[in-house]
Amino acid sequence: MGLLLVLVFIALVASLAIGTRNVAPTEVLAMLGGDREGDAGMIWDLRVPRTLLGLVVGMALGVAGAVAQNITRNPLADPGLIGISAGAAFAVAASVGLLGLEGTQSYVWFAFVGAAIAGALAYFVGGTGVGGATPAKLALAGAAISVLLEAGTSALVLTDPDSLDRYRSWAVGALTGREDDLIWQLSPFVVVGVVLALVIAGRLNALALGDDLATTLGAKAGTTRLLGAGVVVLLTGAAVAAAGPIVFVGLVVPHVMRAFVGPDARWLVPASGLAGAVLLLVADVIGRVIARPTEVEVGVVTAFLGAPFLIYLVKSGKLREQDS
């Protein structure tokens, strides 16, 4: 955890100093000291909001992934892979295209509702049949629901060119082009979600042992799973409303952190939050420098980083081991 805090600090400094035009670390220190002139002013006006947004969104996705994998006992329970992100995106597109809403504060509630409905539908479809919600079935159900929702989203935005322009920059998954006060609008949702995740972390450990044993240990399995699902929806809805559907962060981070801190959710949840912030900030920095003088959006970078990791999980047999 101490190392993670150091990495978060390094990622924050890198995000403030590195971009299409690099800034000397002394200018970052000058900005932190209150200077608002020259490069220090540019950092304060442009990079500080972007960096804080990346910190909050990365933390939300990391915690959401850790909780989702615990409540489902499923290694593929990433909010992006089981349709939750697609549900939030569809709801945002509907609010923009059909209702003409603008600004995150206007459509954030739609993102929450869309995330909740899509997640419940994916778990219901994936949980039918023999064996319940196995990793493969949940992944297939989530993929099918994601494709269906993405098709509906495309149909909505293509019928209205103005909505398409507003939606396109958001849908790719980016930390740029957002309202300056966006971080303050969404932080309360993320704080509530993270705190609730930490509160139920002990119950998540019991839930990992199975519903029957969890009940004998005093943890109500249904209540714990419901609270965990609320955490995932709250954090994912806020993250998607802010930055668009960024995938793989919630999948990669808990797996990596589990190798360092073990399966205890009391450590895994906060570690995943910190590591998620590091991953998203680093991915954003990579996107700024690999295509200068333009940028590659952070959602594209995380997809390139996360896809090989998912292939590794499948090839290594880890999914079959956890499924059994």
Image (cartoon, rainbow, N blue to C red):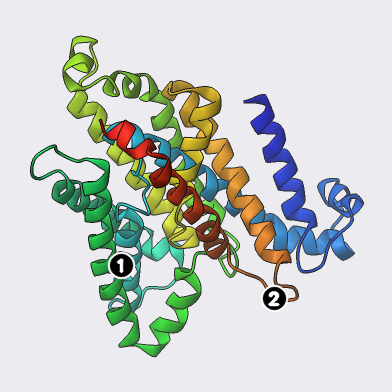
Decide: is 95 above or below 159: above
**Quick check: can you spot residue 135?**
yes
Amino acid at dot 2: Thr
Q: Measuring 72% from the left and 33% from the top, which residue is drawn there?
A: 6
Q: In the picture, residue 110 is in which quadrant?
A: bottom left
Decide if residue 260 is on the left or right side of residue 205: right
Amino acid at dot 1: Phe
Which residue is labeled 2 in the image?
Answer: 294
Image mark for residue 90:
1
Q: Which percent across, then down, holds residue 95? A: 31, 71
Give neighbour class at mark 2: few <14, some 14-19, many 20+ (Cα, 10 Å). Answer: few
Give neighbour class at mark 1: few <14, some 14-19, many 20+ (Cα, 10 Å). Answer: many
Q: Which percent across, then down, holds residue 34? A: 84, 49
Decide: is 260 above or below 76: above
Decide: is 275 above or below 38: above
Decide if residue 182 is on the left or right side of residue 236: right
Decide if residue 284 is on the left or right side of residue 25: left
Disc 2 is placed on an element classified as loop
Q: Measuring 47% from the left and 36% from the top, which residue is drawn there?
A: 255
Q: Nearer the viewer, mark 2 or mark 1?
A: 2
Q: Which percent across, then down, holds residue 179? A: 56, 65
Image mark for residue 132:
none
Q: How many marks?
A: 2
Marks 2/1: CA–CA distance = 28 Å
Q: Measuring 74% from the left and 42% from the top, which residue is drawn there?
A: 10
Which part of the image, by quadrant, shows the C terminus? top left
**Quick check: can you spot residue 68?**
no
Q: Measuring 58% from the left and 51% from the top, which residue is drawn there?
A: 280
Q: Earlier in the sequence, mark 2 or mark 1?
A: 1
The reply to whether the C-beta atoms of the residues labelled 2 and 1 are less than 8 Å apart is: no
Q: In the picture, residue 152 is in which quadrant?
A: bottom left
